[in-house]
């Protein structure tokens, strides 16, 4: 299909009457949009709750284990004065 044929096809389509729109299209779109917003808000709250729980768990673990201290040596010190 060359350019003039495409242009003619587009003109025919544009000259036709617009397709009928369902009467409840706007209400359905609003309902779906609100549902998506609620779901997104719930997901964000759950993720913040998980991040907070992970931070608290890390804090409790770090307070009990003290990972910043040096572990005791597993080897014996060198013997001197034999």
Image (cartoon, rainbow, N blue to C red):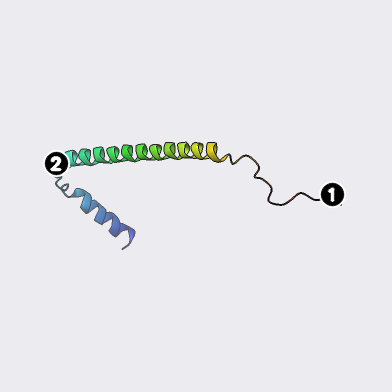
Which residue: 46% across, 39% down?
57
Where does label 1 land, which residue?
80
Q: Secondary structure at mark 2?
A: loop
Q: Nearer the viewer, residue 17 or 3?
A: 17
Relative vertical location of residue 20 with respect to residue 34 in this rendering, above or below: below
How far from the left and from the top, in percent, is residue 18? 17, 46
1 or 2: tag closer to the N-terminus: 2
> Mark 1 packing: few (<14 Cα in 10 Å), some, or many (20+)?
few
Which residue: 38% across, 37% down?
49
Q: Between marks 1 and 2, how big is the CA–CA gap?
A: 92 Å
Q: Is residue 32 left or right of residue 59?
A: left
User: Hey, which quadrant is residue 5 in on the image?
Assistant: bottom left
> Mark 2 packing: few (<14 Cα in 10 Å), some, or many (20+)?
few
Q: Secondary structure at mark 1?
A: loop
Do the residues bearing badges 1 and 2 touch, measured as CB atoms within 8 Å?
Answer: no
Which residue: 81% across, 50% down?
79
Q: Quadrant of the N terminus?
A: bottom left
How far from the left and from the top, in percent, is residue 7? 29, 54
How far from the left and from the top, in percent, is residue 43? 34, 41
Residue reaching furthest to the bottom = 1
Of tags 1 and 2, the one toward the viewer is: 1
Where does label 2 land, which residue?
24
């Amino acid at each position: 299909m060359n350019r003039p044929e495409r242009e003619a096809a587009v003109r025919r389509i544009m000259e036709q009457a617009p397709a009928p729109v369902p009467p409840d299209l706007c209400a359905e779109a609003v309902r779906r949009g609100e549902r998506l917003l609620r779901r997104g808000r719930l997901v964000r709250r759950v993720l913040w709750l998980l991040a907070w729980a992970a931070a608290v768990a890390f804090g409790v673990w770090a307070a009990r284990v003290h990972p910043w201290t040096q572990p005791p040596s597993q080897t014996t010190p060198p013997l001197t004065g034999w």
